[in-house]
Image (cartoon, grey):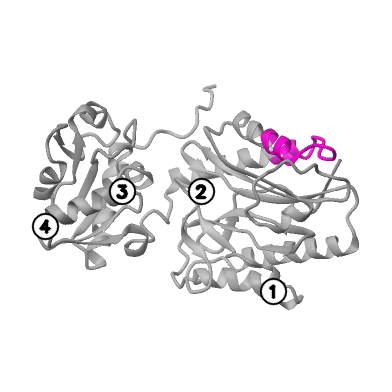
């Protein structure tokens, strides 16, 4: 029997298909093309990331009716030639001492309108504008927000694996001692567990105990966790190149009646948000569904953030489950559902799962219990 080795690598055809889709989406949006800088967009579209992301200009140019072309520093050309998209992209280079923007100018339409990666440096965007004054630029998120939002089967496999690894870390963290230890110690345990379960990168380990839990983005500090504390755990990173992100709220010892009521309220809001997931529903409706539950209990002012965000090559990306986001859900989209209630100076509760849209509803990628766990 052959051992499982994880998902198969993405192929040159996978990247060619993604670049074609980028060109089609740009054309449909009335744009000339797409300019892709080092970062998640370049990894997604070409499978390439420079060893060092620096001021040296690297740029993939995608047009509807022209071969994709990538401009790279000459010293990095060998790495670009060995990228998994090799053969589907024409390469051109520039050398130190030369003007990279003069090299880029022939790749652009003189009056072109381009979507450009959010990760592009201002220095480079200004250089392009000076070299080709008639061009105009829009951020990738504003112009093509759904470019990476719908995941294919291979991406879903990676996200499922990452979610299961985060779940395994949670199953182990609830066995450790909380009381009498600092938040940073528990956060270090969480980071270690994520790595033990195959993460290549840990992006965050929020441990908010007692009153610190009322700050949704509290960074683990030196506060000593005490008996009677509610503790918000929010953690994730990258495995197989794709993100994990989950939140669970545990209690040290027996909770009060109010703490149980708030926890159950958040659990019901999270379930209601999940049940609202289906193709064609606007992203904002997931936020509205979860928020109605919390507002109906008189705690609407204590739910102080959006209900969710997309996840993929990065742990936060479009689509966003927030009021005003009217884009309809599509099968293959992946995002968090993470309502919370934050009682100032006392405690907070957040429950978060990554969910993917299916043909007729949603599927959770996090499957640990959503009932309150009591820890020691």
Q: CA distance from mark 2 to mark 1?
A: 26 Å
Asked if the stretch drawn in magenta spans residue 326, the answer is no
Give the side of residue 232 with respect to residue 320, left or right: right
Q: Earlier in the sequence, mark 3 or mark 1?
A: 3
Tag nearer the camera, 3 or 1? 3
Q: CA distance from mark 4 to mark 3?
A: 21 Å
Q: What kind of element bears circle 4?
A: loop
Residue at image x 71%, y 71%? 294
Residue at image x 70%, y 69%? 302
Q: Decide which of 113, 242 is in the foreground and name it.
A: 113
Residue at image x 89%, y 47%? 253
The C terminus lies in quadrant: top right
Give the side of residue 209 with respect to residue 140, left or right: right
Tag nearer the camera, 2 or 1? 1
Residue linked to disc 1: 300
Q: Measured from the top left, where is residue 255 in percent x and y? A: 88, 55
Q: Residues within 10 Å of mark 4 (few under 14, many from 20)?
A: some
- The quarter of the picture where residue 109 lies is bottom left
Residue linked to disc 3: 121
Q: Which mark is residue 186?
A: none
Q: Which mark is residue 315?
A: 2
Q: Measured from the top left, where is residue 140 in percent x and y? A: 33, 58
Residue linked to disc 4: 109
Q: Earlier in the sequence, mark 3 or mark 2?
A: 3
Contact? badges 2 and 4 (CB < 8 Å): no
């Amino acid at each position: 029997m052959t051992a499982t080795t994880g998902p198969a690598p993405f192929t040159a055809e996978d990247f060619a298909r993604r670049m074609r889709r980028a060109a089609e989406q740009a054309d449909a949006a009335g744009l000339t093309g797409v300019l892709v800088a080092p970062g998640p967009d370049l990894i997604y579209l070409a499978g390439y990331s420079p060893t060092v992301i620096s001021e040296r200009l690297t740029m993939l140019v995608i047009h509807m009716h022209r071969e994709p072309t990538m401009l790279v520093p000459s010293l990095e050309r060998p790495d670009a030639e060995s990228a998994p998209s090799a053969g589907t992209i024409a390469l051109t280079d520039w050398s130190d001492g030369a003007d990279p923007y003069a090299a880029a100018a022939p790749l652009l339409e003189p009056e072109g309108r381009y979507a450009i990666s959010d990760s592009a440096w201002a220095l480079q965007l200004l250089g392009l504008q000076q070299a080709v004054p008639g061009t105009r630029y829009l951020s990738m998120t504003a112009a093509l927000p759904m470019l990476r939002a719908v995941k294919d089967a291979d991406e879903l496999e990676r996200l499922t694996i990452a979610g299961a690894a985060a779940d395994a870390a949670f199953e182990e963290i609830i066995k450790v001692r909380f009381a009498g230890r600092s938040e940073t110690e528990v956060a270090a345990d969480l980071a270690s567990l994520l790595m033990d379960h195959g993460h290549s990168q840990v992006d965050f380990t929020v441990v908010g105990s007692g009153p610190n839990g009322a700050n949704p983005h509290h960074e683990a500090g030196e506060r000593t966790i005490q008996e009677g504390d509610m503790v918000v755990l929010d953690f994730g990173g990258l495995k197989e190149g794709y993100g994990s992100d989950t939140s669970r709220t545990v209690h040290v010892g027996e909770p009060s009646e109010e703490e149980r009521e708030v926890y159950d309220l958040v659990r019901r809001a999270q379930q209601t948000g999940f049940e609202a997931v289906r193709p064609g529903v606007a992203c904002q409706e997931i936020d509205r569904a979860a928020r109605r539950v919390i507002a109906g209990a008189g705690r609407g002012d204590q739910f102080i953030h959006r209900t969710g965000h997309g996840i993929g090559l990065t742990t936060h990306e479009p689509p966003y489950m927030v009021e005003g986001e009217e884009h309809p859900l599509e099968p293959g989209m992946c995002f968090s559902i993470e309502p919370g209630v934050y009682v100032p100076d006392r405690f907070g509760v957040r429950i978060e799962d990554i969910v993917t849209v299916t043909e007729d509803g949603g599927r959770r990628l996090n499957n640990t219990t959503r009932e309150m766990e009591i820890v020691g």
